[in-house]
Amino acid sequence: MELATKNVSEVISEIKELLETEFSNIAIVGEISNLSLSSSGHWYFTLSDKDASMSAALFKMDALRNPLIKKIKDGDKVIVIGDINVYPKRGTFQVIVKRITPMGVGDLKEQFEKLKRKLASEGLFDIDTKKTIPALPKRVAIITAQRGAALADFINIYKRRSIWMDLVVVPTLVQGDDAPRALRASLHNVIKYSMDATSDKKIDLIVLARGGGSLEDLWAFNDEGLAWDLHNCPIPTISAIGHEVDFSISDFVCDLRAETPSAAAEIITHQQTLIKEKMSTLKGRLISFIEIKTSRIHNRLKYAHPNSILNIIWSVFNSYQKRLTRVDLRNRFGELTHIHEFYLELDENLEAMKTSLKEKMISLNHRLDKSMGLLKVLNPKNVLERGYGYVETAEGGVITSAKEMKRIGSEVELNLHFHDGKTKIKKI
């Protein structure tokens, strides 16, 4: 007989119609976990009991009609009234809450607090019983889910910060009904392995790790048997369960609680990180010291080289030679006698005398030119050119008047001058 086939959309559509028809306006009792408020004003949370859980949503308009939602917190037991809604794209369903009423603290929260009080009274949480966490563990065992995000985060930090620490991963169940038994078995196996191992293979520290989740997701770590096993464990233990706000019984029993698995890895590798930083600092200081020392030795070798020594000798020799030159009196005659000043003054006087003589010659030439011009004007020959003449005696005297002419005797030779020469005449 061949079955009729349907596609996914058809199947989901039929389930949606059936669920939303049959489960309309129903009342559900459950414990609140993972309560969150979105930026749009809608509330989302998980309703659960010890065996099952389901998603729920209280949208903004219904939240305004249920102001008590602001006082509800994780772990509270409530009664919700609403409709079952199917989201076709994911094939999931949730209850759309129309009304929510608190019923007090939920069963899981109540069981947690009851067990916490019981174990505390039995001394499992006492500080005096807790072992010291080794500062530099050589071998660490981590009990967690093999493919969980907690292990990946732990290993990433371990690889980045650790120097020599060996990590032993012990995969185990961390959620579900079988998880407490699996966790206890893994813890016993680690203890037995460490006790049978050689000194270099023994486990120095055990980390119990799991990622975040709701109260029911972390319930395996609230097992009383696991709490006693951790309390009696001869190896120091760290509990790294959930996020910062999550607490489990294991957190109180273990020798140290880390807020997250990543925080546990940082705590374990803290001293190693300090050593790495110190080694890095010392390395830098050592390199700097070697460079300075090498530079000094290099400079000493450089100065000790024969060429350098010879240059120093020549420098000293030249310095002394210059000093000898400065104290040689023969070469300092001018400096000591100031003869150069006299030479300078003499040169200045000589130049001044030349200038004065030159100016004097110019002045005399000018006067001579004026006198020559005046003589030229007074020269009688210039008058003779106009037809005049004058009589001169044989002795060279000039007869300037008739009276002088009369005094001269007869038969006396005279010179008669013209502009172009002279001629002799005789007075009768």
Image: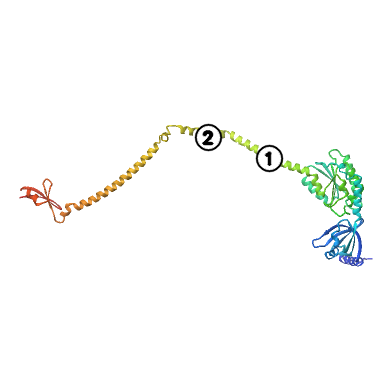
Q: Amino acid at mark 2?
A: Ser
- Can you give x and y, in whole percent of width and height, for residue 390 in the image? 12, 52
**Residue at (86%, 66%) from the top-left corner?**
9
- Can you give x and y, in whole percent of width and height, for residue 315 in the image? 52, 34
**Residue at (20%, 52%) from the top-left corner?**
376
> Could you tell whether 274 is left or right of 50 in the image?
left
Q: Are marks 2 and 1 in contact (CB under 8 Å)?
A: no
Q: Which residue is mark 1?
A: 287
- Can you give x and y, in whole percent of width and height, for residue 381 in the image? 17, 52
Residue 291 seen in this snapshot: yes
In terms of depth relative to the viewer, which is nearer, 322 or 309?
322
Quadrant position of residue 206:
top right
> Could you tell whether 47 is left or right of 411 in the image?
right
**Residue at (20%, 53%) from the top-left corner?**
377
In terms of depth relative to the viewer, which is nearer, 286 or 47?
47
In terms of depth relative to the viewer, which is nearer, 178 or 42?
42
Quadrant position of residue 336:
top left
Q: Earlier in the sequence, mark 2 or mark 1?
A: 1
Q: Is residue 66 above or below residue 308?
A: below
Residue 235 seen in this snapshot: no
